[in-house]
Image (spheres, rainbow, N blue to C red):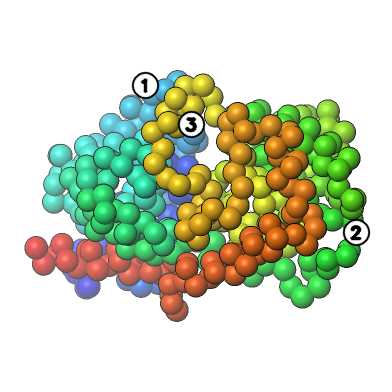
């Protein structure tokens, strides 16, 4: 792909997870195409900046999550959308890659497609069109040339819904299996005491505020019902750690709260069971082999929107497996009593526990992508799309 001028790729992410994906993609593109003739521009965080990006503005200015938060920051976000689109059109890059955060990145892509239709656009991470608002999939064809999917069922979902051409490139967790999975003897045996229970109330302040109370009360009930003692660990992300600590003060079962990625993965490798908020963490737990109960609560306005959900589960692990082996207690079902009832069988060698463990054994085959790692496969697709557009 030699050319007289440097190849320019703009990458636009909207939050930390997208920044991590973007940084790995940049690294793989440099390895594949050579760093000398490759220039990057766009919006990213510290990880992408370490790979050579000068972000148009700090990622924190747009990294807002949830419907209510987006509405509150809408004027600022709209200003950044215009600024980002203007910069891309002026730079005339060879490609634009948008990463996740559709409230921001898809709006940028639509403006760029309208004003500079010759720039190919790749979307890295599919919106949850298979769960709700499926009409978004065919609309994406107007401004997305190719979609890079993290979940193995997403290409078929987009084909069914009329979405853009989609390739499963693998979930980044595939690259972390050595961190997630216990070494021999690291996870306790069936008769070891105390049992080790993970509690994961979410990475957003709204999740923590809604889930810490029922989680704490469920642990009190569980302690009174469980025939075996257990200890609780909460791996807390930095920006909610203080809130988690403050709310855990009222719990009768006092947890050990750890911070940082290394401490989190150690806790995963040692855990016997987990109580978790819905999210990517359910896939982390499944790949680690930790049976779990999943819960979620949303605001009243979001509760109305959730009636539009079409997916058979909100748990990513259930969706990848194609069967609902993990109990999910949502909104009004997220009560201390129901949480404790669902967790209790997981603290012994029960059919419920064995069913989850057997299902987790299928995840590797369902998520495998061959010899490539996800960022390498993503970079290969980017190069192929670039080559196809050069010949148009």
Q: Secondary structure at mark 2?
A: loop
- How far is the residue under mark 3 from the one under mark 1? 16 Å
Q: Of callouts 1 and 2, which one flags the residue occurring earlier in the amino acid sequence?
A: 1
At a point 73% along the width and 62% down the height, the residue shown is 269
At a point 22% along the width and 73% down the height, the residue shown is 1
Residue farthest along the bottom direction in this orientation? 371
Image height of 249 relative to 139, above or below: above
Q: Position of residue 205 (x, y in %)?
A: 62, 31
Residue occupied by mark 3: 66
Q: Quadrant of residue 388?
A: bottom left
Q: Of callouts 3 and 2, which one flags the residue occurring earlier in the amino acid sequence?
A: 3
Image quadrant holding the C terminus, namely bottom left
Residue occupied by mark 2: 193
Residue occupied by mark 1: 75
Q: Residues within 10 Å of mark 3 (few under 14, many from 20)?
A: few
Q: Secondary structure at mark 1?
A: helix
- How far is the residue under mark 1 from the one under mark 2? 54 Å
Report the mark closest to the observer, 3 or 2. 2
Image height of 58 relative to 288, above or below: above
């Amino acid at each position: 792909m030699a050319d007289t001028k440097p190849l320019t790729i703009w990458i636009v992410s909207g939050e930390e997870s997208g920044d991590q994906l973007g940084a790995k993609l940049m690294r793989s593109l440099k390895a594949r195409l050579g760093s000398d003739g490759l220039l990057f521009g766009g919006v990213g965080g510290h990880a992408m900046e370490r790979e050579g990006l000068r972000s148009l503005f700090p990622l924190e200015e747009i990294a807002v999550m949830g419907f209510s938060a987006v509405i509150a920051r809408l004027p600022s976000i709209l200003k950044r959308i215009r600024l980002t689109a203007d910069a891309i059109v002026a730079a005339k890059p060879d490609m634009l890659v948008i990463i996740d955060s559709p409230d921001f990145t898809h709006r940028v892509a639509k403006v760029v497609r309208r004003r500079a239709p010759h720039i190919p656009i790749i979307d890295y991470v599919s919106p949850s069109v298979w769960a709700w608002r499926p009409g978004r999939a065919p609309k994406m064809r107007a401004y997305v040339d190719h979609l890079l999917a993290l979940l193995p069922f997403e290409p078929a979902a987009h084909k069914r819904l009329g979405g853009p051409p989609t390739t499963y490139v693998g979930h980044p967790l595939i690259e972390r299996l050595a961190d997630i999975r216990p070494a021999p003897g690291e996870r306790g045996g069936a008769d070891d005491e105390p049992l080790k229970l993970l509690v994961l109330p979410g990475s957003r302040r709204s999740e923590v505020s809604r889930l810490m109370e029922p989680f704490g009360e469920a642990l009190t009930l569980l302690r009174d019902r469980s025939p075996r003692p257990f200890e609780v660990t909460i791996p807390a992300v930095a920006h909610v750690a203080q809130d988690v600590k403050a709310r855990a003060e009222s719990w009768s079962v006092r947890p050990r709260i750890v911070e940082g990625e290394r401490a989190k993965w150690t806790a995963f490798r040692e855990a016997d069971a987990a109580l978790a908020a819905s999210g990517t963490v359910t896939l982390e737990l499944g790949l680690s082999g930790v049976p779990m109960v999943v819960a979620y609560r949303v605001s009243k306005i979001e509760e109305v929107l959730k009636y539009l959900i079409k997916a058979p589960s909100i748990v990513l692990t259930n969706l990848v497996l194609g069967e609902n082996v993990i109990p999910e207690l949502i909104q009004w079902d997220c009560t201390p009593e129901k949480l404790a009832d669902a967790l209790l069988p997981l603290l012994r060698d029960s059919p419920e526990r064995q069913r989850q463990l057997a299902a987790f054994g299928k995840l590797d085959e369902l998520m495998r992508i061959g010899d490539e790692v996800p960022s390498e496969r993503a970079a290969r697709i980017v190069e192929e799309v670039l080559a196809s557009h050069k010949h148009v």
